[in-house]
Amino acid sequence: MTTVLAYLDPGSGSMILQIIAGGLAAVAVTAKLYWNRLLRFLRIRKDEPETTVETSSARSTDSA
């Protein structure tokens, strides 16, 4: 019979849980960022038309 000489103290267990939680959070944020792109790629959602936004600098130069 073999003996395992390993010990995990409470700090190591806490660190492992934090690594797992951080990894899950990173996956969730990445999925949220790319969700619309994935839906458009799978043709589930159509592309939205781009809207143009007027800049305030263009209006201020006209009045001067």
Image (cartoon, helix red, strand yellow):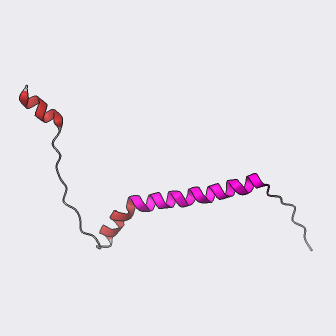
Question: Within the image, what quadrant is residue 58 found in?
Answer: top left
| Up/down of 61 relative to 27, above or below | above
**Which residue is depicted at the point 18% across and 60% down?**
49
Residue 54 is situated, as x and y percent measured from the top left of the image, at 15, 42
29 is within the stretch colored magenta: yes
Quarter of the N terminus within the rendering:
bottom right
How far across and how far down the image is residue 60, in percent? 12, 30
Secondary structure that dominates the magenta span? helix
Residue drawn at x 11%, y 29% is 61
User: For the point 17% across and 36% down, which residue is it?
Assistant: 56
At x 16%, y 33%, the residue is: 57
What is the count of numbered marks?
0
Residue 38 at x, y = what percent?
Answer: 36, 67
Query: Is 45 above or below relative to 11?
Result: below
Residue in the foreground of this view, choosing between 43 and 51: 51
Residue farthest top in this picture: 64
Q: Residue furthest left?
A: 63
Bounds of the magenta segment: 8-33
